[in-house]
Image (cartoon, rainbow, N blue to C red):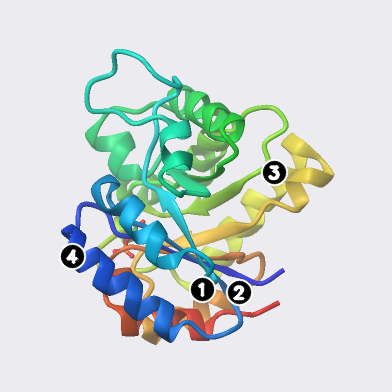
Amino acid sequence: MPQLIAGNWKMHKLRAEAIALARDLRAGAGAGANLLVCPPFTALAAVADILAGSRIAVGGQDCHPATQGAHTGDISAPMLRDAGASHVILGHSERRQNHGETSEFVREKVVAAIAAGLTPIVCVGETADQRQGGAETETVGWQLSGSLPEGFAGIVAYEPVWAIGSGKTPTEDEVAAMHGFIRAELARQFGDAGRAVPILYGGSVKPANAKALLGLPEIGGALIGGASLIAADFLAIAGAALGG
Ligand code: PEP
């Protein structure tokens, strides 16, 4: 399977900027990796229109577990679908930290996303303190068992919290060890289906380190924050990915 290179635009880009970036990506995307961009909600439909019929899919950055209701400021999985999304990022560390999202709440969102026909990308990862204390696999293990519902069919992203936006990355050995652990956990939880779940790496992936990280075992692709905001950088990372 080709690797997936996914861009998380976070709270960046006004609509005109998002449209310009989407146009540049559409014009520059070569064959090879699968590509996905996750714009802010305000730009999602416009970006989906620009990318319709292209090789680049569109996703949301979060959704609420309910399909509709009195949830001010939230957005539902069917709304994301309606706006042109095929994927949704769930349980990103910025949601877990800034919005107090627990793994149990993330699991409810995953169920809602799958019910709406979206592919969830479920983020897990340890803090610097947890790694320094030797608790990284235990932390990720709890996040996986708490966040993934029975029969999970989606994508997992390993994103060490301390590597996000910091310019720091784990060593290649550390990434390979964690991805091996996640693969074993997925197989334990879901059997054969767990062996097919793509596991992305995320955290300060740049054109300069993409080839080395994407070449490690059990890497199904990458989730990119900062470097996904610049078309040339995102496309360079995509060019380093394995096309399958
Ligand atoms: C992210 O927040 O998902 C991320 C990977 O960010 P960055 O690439 O900027 O570290």
Residue drawn at x 20%, y 52% as measured from the top left? 11
Q: Nearer the viewer, residue 159 or 121?
A: 121
Q: For mark 4, does the 10 Å Cα neighbourhood hold few (<14), some (14 to 19), or many (20 or more) residues?
A: few
- Structural distance between the alpha carbons of marks 1 and 2: 7 Å
Rendered position, 91 above or below 183: above
- Structural distance between the alpha carbons of marks 4 and 1: 38 Å
- Structural distance between the alpha carbons of marks 1 and 3: 21 Å
Mark 4 vs mark 1: give the one in front: 4
Numbered label attached to residue 172: 1
State which tag comes first along the sequence, 2 or 4. Answer: 4
Element at label 4: helix
Label 1–label 2 contact, CB within 8 A: yes
Mark 2 vs mark 4: give the one in front: 4
Q: Position of residue 219 (x, y in %)?
A: 60, 66
Residue 60 located left or right of residue 74: right
Q: Is mark 1 within 8 Å of ligand 1?
A: no
Which amino acid lies under the numbered mark 1 shown in the image of this protein? Glu
Rendered position, 118 above or below 177: above
State which tag comes first along the sequence, 1 or 3. Answer: 1
Q: For mark 1, does the 10 Å Cα neighbourhood hold few (<14), some (14 to 19), or many (20 or more) residues?
A: some
Q: For mark 2, does the 10 Å Cα neighbourhood hold few (<14), some (14 to 19), or many (20 or more) residues?
A: some
- Structural distance between the alpha carbons of marks 3 and 4: 40 Å
Which amino acid lies under the numbered mark 3 shown in the image of this protein? Leu
State which tag comes first along the sequence, 3 or 2. Answer: 3
Residue 122 located left or right of residue 10: right
- Structural distance between the alpha carbons of marks 3 and 2: 18 Å
Numbered label attached to residue 199: none
Residue 144 located left or right of residue 226: right
Q: Position of residue 77 (x, y in %)?
A: 46, 33
Label 3–label 4 contact, CB within 8 A: no
Can you say which quadrant of the picture contains the N terminus? bottom right
- Structural distance between the alpha carbons of marks 2 and 4: 37 Å
